[in-house]
Image: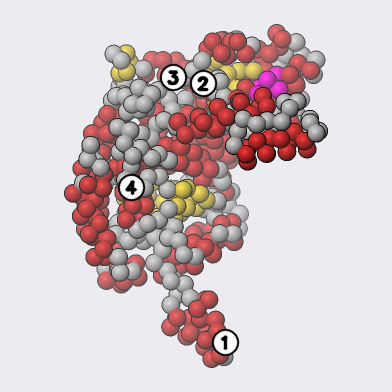
Amino acid sequence: MTQPVDLPAWQALNQHYQSTKHLTLREMFAGDGTRFEQFQLTAAGVFLDYSKNHVSAETMSLLTALARESHVPQGIAAMFAGERVNPTEQRPALHTALRNRSGKAVIVDGNDVMPAINKVLDRLAVFSNKVRNGEWCGYDGSMITDVVNIGIGGSDLGPLMASEALAAFAHERLNIHFVSNVDGSHLASTIKNLDPKTTLFIIASKTFTTQETLTNAGSAKQWFLDSGASEVDVAKHFVALSTNTERVTAFGIDAENMFEFWDWVGGRYSLWSAIGLPIILSIGMERFEQLLEGAHAMDEHFRTAPLDQNLPVTLALLTVWYNNFHGAHSHLIAPYDQYLHRFPAYLQQLTMESNGKSVHLDGSEVSCNTGPIVWGEPGTNGQHAYFQLVHQGTHIIPTDFILPMESLNPVGQHHELLMANCFAQSEALMMGKNSEELTLEMREAGVTVDEIDRLTGHRTFAGNRPSNTIMVHRLDAHALGALIALYEHKVFVEAAIWNINPFDQWGVELGKQLASAIQKELSSAKPVTNHDSSTNGLINRALKMRNLHA
Ligand code: F6P
């Protein structure tokens, strides 16, 4: 196998980096007044300005050549065609079929998967309508007021993020809650003020084997039964979203109350499937379909646009450029929209569980860095927390600013202030403030020469820090769908370039296995001795602190 680093385009990019690394963004903008026009793209209602990056037309053409040499177009075609693009689990990855609004068939193993997808969507529509309009009642005839989704990872983060993002369109009567952590406090604090008679639990688990989810689901069921309800009442208050009918029925949820999906839906790509039920309950089926349509529009763009005009491809190439040539290790997501407050957390799982890999598709060790650390918080809050490091720290942190043009809650000048801050941050990151500008500014403010000397180093901003700005008209379901699909495909393209599998997650298994073993030892009457000295010590210390042995 040719290593990515041995591809001609990779080598050419190495040389290009060496010969251009001295150029600053300031100089690039000063030398070319058309950068904004040159380095922008629009697709599916999403606008991207990527001019504030360390790229020229030549850089982009070399990066595009890298995508071609990495067979990105073939990879895109294979994914949409339902080929087994997840070779370690021998599965296709067909989240695009879940939002396929084209009416065309998607064939897996000789069968069209669209009728099954549409059937589940129809069932979800019927069920959610009943809950929303009050027809689906609790066991004593009361309307449902609270919905608690119990799930973790992809069975939590996607629906949680999207329900929060679209909270402006939420149903008035239904409060949607999410319980993920096995820490009992999460469940306890969520159900504390709920009425079992008006609460609907959604147990969301692709495998229905996940320890945290089953533990929370078991305790929720116990809470429900302890309140005076009987086993037959469970049917009105517990539904499941899963691929595993056997386990769901074994848990005590009737298959009638299960909404299925399929093993070719990856956990972190599952919000478009039955896992989206909390979103549907909150915003209604019509709006959920708009979410699917927004994603489908981005899918169509991704599938058909030439590489150099392709929004997800462009974002991925920029990440590769910084990650593998500029030595950046992290990527900041800065949504300037409070409704997107869980978007960075959602993207953490999407990108870090997908591209946190150290071997190529053929199992050989990688010879280049793969997925960067993704993190963030909404603006403007981040400005008053970690932006100091982004501006003046020693790390280069490429940043995505995400900003809707219209507020869903227009209040006074709030939105103009929010937008101004967003644009100001990317400008400040790029332009910085040099010592001459600073000296002039301080002189004009009457600062003494001694003070100027003392403070100049501290108050200088090097600038030259790259960012993208992504804008949508307003954060509605269509725009959110397009935004999520944009990042899903970005992750896919990065993986294709690093030649890794973005659809498995073996790295989470070891911890799960060890936790099962240790859980049994936590009720041991004797000191534990079968681990390393630190782990033994921690377990024994815990046993002692819990008075389980001397
Ligand atoms: O953390 C590993 C993982 O398998 C994720 O990929 C997945 O989203 C999550 O656990 C939950 O899995 P499940 O939906 O099967 O409960």
- Where residue 135 appears, as percent x and y from the top left, is 64, 17
Q: Write down the residue under mark 3.
A: 262
Mark 2 CB lies closer than 8 A to ligand 1: yes
Q: Are marks 1 and 4 in contact (CB under 8 Å)?
A: no
Badge 1 or badge 4: first in the primary sequence: 4
Report the disc number at residue 451.
1
Q: Which quadrant would the C terminus be assigned to in this image?
A: top right
Check disc 4: other Cα within 10 Å, few if <14, some if 14-19, many if 20+: few
Figure coloring: secondary structure
Q: What residue type is labelled 1?
A: Glu
Nearest the camera: 392 or 473?
392
Residue at 56% across / 90% down in the picture?
450
Nearest the camera: 158 or 304?
158
Q: Write down the residue under mark 2.
A: 207
Badge 4 or badge 3: first in the primary sequence: 3
Q: Do the residues labelled 2 and 4 touch (CB within 8 Å)?
A: no
Which residue extends farthest top? Answer: 232
Is 286 left, or right, of 54 in this rendering? right
What SS does tag 4 mark?
A: loop
Badge 1 or badge 3: first in the primary sequence: 3
The Cα atoms of the two marked residues, 1 and 2, are separated by 64 Å
The Cα atoms of the two marked residues, 1 and 3, are separated by 67 Å
Q: What residue type is labelled 2?
A: Thr
What SS does tag 3 mark?
A: loop
Q: Are marks 4 and 3 in contact (CB under 8 Å)?
A: no
Which residue extends farthest left? Answer: 8
Nearest the camera: 447 or 375?
375
Q: Write down the residue under mark 4.
A: 368
Q: What residue type is labelled 4?
A: Cys
Which residue extends farthest bottom? Answer: 449
